[in-house]
Image (cartoon, rainbow, N blue to C red):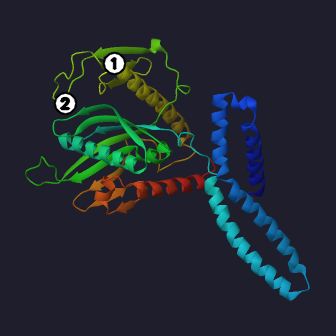
Amino acid sequence: MKEKLKQIIDRFKELESLLADPKIISDNDKLKETAKEHTHINIVIPKANRYLVLVNEIEENKLLLNSDDDELKSLAMEEISQMEKELIELEDELKILLIPKDPNDDKNTIIEIRAGTGGEEAALFAADLFRMYSKFAEINGWTREVMASNGTGIGGFKEIIFSVKGSSVYGMMKFESGVHRVQRVPKTETGGRLHTSAATVAVLPEAEDAEIDVSESDLKIDTYRASGAGGQHVNKTESAIRITHIPTGLVVTCQDEKSQHKNRTAAMKVLKSRLLAQEEERLAKERADARKSMVSTGDRSAKIRTYNFPQGRVTDHRINFTSYKLNEILDGDITEVIEKLKIAEQQELMASDI
């Protein structure tokens, strides 16, 4: 630990010099990359310095244990005991801070919610999830923008795609990928029977242009007139866009904007983010044999959470966490669940040699 922290402190000093280098300052990409690394390491530096000070002070106090002065030896032993306790706490904190950071954590995100089994009730549940994430974004001071949606006549969504922008959005939202299940008596149920429905959530890191290069020759772009929930045309011009990525077969449609240009821009953002996610899923599968993760596998087919209305209960199946704050959670208060998932992921990473 001691040598590793010294290397980090040396790297921090090097980064500070680089940030003052005119060559770095004149290169926006390099400056952004250097500043990002500097910010991440900066969090570690105060604790790293304190750790090294404690190690030196403990070593100095241990020399006093050879003294003939009993009072001095007693004081030294007392100080060593206190400092070793602080050192253990610092080491635990540093282990968490030194866990390799997911490079996507600082990115904005694109979230796709699709109604699964359960018909109209599943579509209403998809709308509930959209509202929950919208409220959570509002609580965190993030901005949310709908990119594409396919609504139903009674307020549900067969599918809704939206972007969330702000500080460390993906790092918080990535744990939401998977199948969400709801157990309740639907509004459409006259017999009072309990139904189980589901919706799938996909959380994608927003791809930056430099990360994904999409050739125009690989795209098939169709335009058509946008339609509303009942199938009727909502405008007279062909503003809706359908983009097909020929090599992968991925299809993205967007019709929420009145402008064809805006719909195309939104559709390309979604396509690039899906392509990035597809590549990262491939890499994750390659690493799967080396480290099995129950927390953030990225497997969108995995059942991750159940919302049980009769019991007022929400259960996250990955970490066996249950909360009886169903209404608060659906109102966007999902911080406790996410924090517990983050801790579980940290524990997995700390226990892993990968």
Label 2: which residue? 229
Q: Is residue 21 left or right of residue 332?
A: right
Q: Is residue 304 left or right of residue 181?
A: right
- Give how far across and how far down residue 147 sits, in percent: 35, 31
Up/down of 49 relative to 29, above or below:
below
Q: Residue at x 33, y 56 (%)?
A: 329
Residue 210 found in image quarter = top right
Residue 264 found in image quarter = top left
- Give how far across and how far down residue 353 sits, in percent: 64, 50
Q: Residues within 10 Å of mark 2 (few under 14, many from 20)?
A: some
- Give how far across and how far down residue 112 sits, in percent: 36, 36
Q: Which mark is residue 260?
A: 1
Q: Is residue 74 left or right of residue 153?
A: right
| Label 1 or label 2, whichever comes before in sequence order | 2
Amino acid, disc 2? Ala
> Can residue 300 be seen in the rendering of this structure?
no
Up/down of 202 relative to 72, above or below:
above
Placement of the N terminus among the 4 image quadrants: bottom right
